[in-house]
Amino acid sequence: MITPRLFTIRRKFSGTTVSDIEATVTREMRRCLPQLRPGARIAIAAGSRGVANIDRIVRAAVECIQSAGGKPFIVPAMGSHGGATAEGQARVLAGYGITEEKAGAPIVASMETIQLPASGLDNKVFMDRAAHGADGVVLVNRIKPHTDFHGRYESGLVKMGVIGLGKHAAALELHAFGASGLRDRIPLTFKAVVETGKILLGIAVIENARDETAHIEAVPGNRILEREPALLDMARRNMPCLPVEDIDVLIIDRMGKEISGVGMDPNIIGRIRIRGQEEPVSPRVKEIAVSGLTPHSYGNAIGIGLADVITKKFFDAIDFNAMNINARTSRFLERAKVPFVAENDKDAFEVALNACGIIPPGAERIVRILDTLHLGEVQVSKAIYEEIKNNVELIKKEEEVIDKKGNLISF
C-alpha cells in the first residue's frame, strides 16, 4: 500500500477584506441604531461558530451601544450547542474569544425562554428570557449557505433570531419538521420574532474564500427579511471550494463545531446525508478520512457520519452525550453514526484508498485540507497537481505527509 506523497499548493482566491473591523461596525451600527433612552438594556446575540474576528465585532458593538448611552449585555444565541446548557454555551462563547473581560459587557447565559404569540403558525415561537426582557436586541451573525438545506434564508440573522435566540426549545420545535420544515418555517417564524419590536438591528458578516471578513453590514430589524437573500447570494459568490471536483481520497486534518455546525461543511465536501434531501452534484469524493476533532468542539463530533474513516484518537475525543444531544435535537441521526475507526492516520489513509477500488499507480486523486474553512493552502497528489498546476502557486514539491509513527505531518 502506498503512503501519500503530496504537493503543497496555494490557490489564487480573489476577494476584498474589511480593513478596519471596529470602524466599520461602528459606522454601520450608527447608521441603523435608533436613539436609545439613557441606560437602555440592549442584548447582543452572538454564538455562530468559526466567524473570523467575531470577538472584535462583538466588542465594537458593545462599545457602540455604550457610546449611545445604552447598557449592553451578551446572550449566547445557540440552539442545542454547548450540550444545551447555560454553562456549556458560555464556554463556547469563551472559545470564540467572547468573555466578559474581553468584550467589556456581562454575559447572561441561560436556557430559559418565553413563548411568543404565534398567530397563523402551527409551530411554537420562543425567545431567550433575558433578551426578551431587554429594551432591544442586536443580532450578530455570519451569512452563509446552510449545512442542512438551501433556500432564500439559510445561515444568518433570520435563523439566529429564530433558533439561536429561541435556544434549545426552538431548536427542538423547528427541527421536528425536518430540513424542509426548517427552510419554510424559519422565515415565517422570524416575522413573529420581529413583531415583538425587540430586534433593533442585525450585524451581517460575510467572509471571502480565504476565511477573512469581506463585508459587514448593519440591517434594521424590520428590513432583515428583505435584505438577507441578497447578502446570502453575496456569501455564495465568496465561498471557497475544493481544488478539483473528482477526488478519490479527501484527507481532512480536523473537524469541529467552530468550523461548521456539522464539523465539516457539507457545501464543501459534497455530502448532506439527510433523508429526503438531494445530495450535491459536486464535488464527487469517493472516501473521506478525518484525523481529529478540534478542542473547541468540547467532544461534540456531530457530522462524524459524513466521514468514511476516522482515527482512534478522534474516536477517543468524542463526548457522546454532547454529540447525541445535538443529533437528537436535529433528528438527523445519520450525521452521528461512527464510521470505520483506524489505528492512526496512515491506517486511515490506507483503508480509505483501498475502499476506492483498483487505481493505476500514480493516478490516485488525493487532496488534503486542514479543515473546510481553510482551503487556500492545500496538498494534492501528482495526478491532480499536473491538472491544475497552471492555476496555483507551488509551495513545496512532492513529499511524504505521514511520519514514521503513522501520524500526519503538520501543514
Image (cartoon, helix red, strand yellow):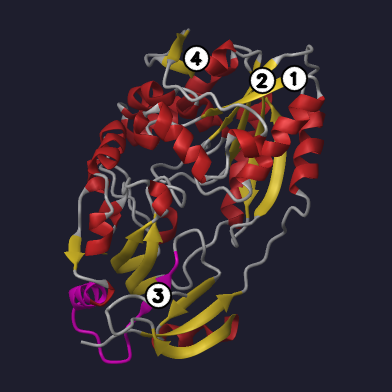
User: On the picture, is 40 further left or further right than 235?
Assistant: right
Q: Which residue is mark 4?
A: 129
Element marked by disc 4? helix
Of marks 2 and 3, which one's residue comes earlier in the chain? 2
Q: Quadrant of residue 389?
A: bottom right
**Residue at (45, 11) in percent of width and height:** 114
The amino acid type of the residue labelled 3 equals: Val
Of marks 3 and 1, which one's residue comes earlier in the chain? 1
Q: Which residue is mark 1?
A: 70
Tell me the tag on residue 42.
Answer: 2
The amino acid type of the residue labelled 1 equals: Gly
Report the magenta residues as a range.
Answer: 347-370
**Disc 2/disc 4 C-alpha distance (Å):** 13 Å
User: On the picture, is 354 further left or further right than 216?
Assistant: left
- How crowded is the residue under tag 2: few (<14 C-alpha within 10 Å), some, or many (20+)? many
- How crowded is the residue under tag 1: few (<14 C-alpha within 10 Å), some, or many (20+)? many
Q: Which residue is mark 3?
A: 367
**Disc 3/disc 1 C-alpha distance (Å):** 50 Å
Q: Horizontal and vertical percent for residue 109?
A: 49, 25
Q: Would residue 355 be counted in the magenta stretch?
A: yes
Of marks 1 and 2, which one's residue comes earlier in the chain? 2
Q: Nearer the viewer, mark 4 or mark 3?
A: 4
Q: Nearer the viewer, mark 3 or mark 1?
A: 1
- For the question of whether residue 120 can be seen, the reply is no
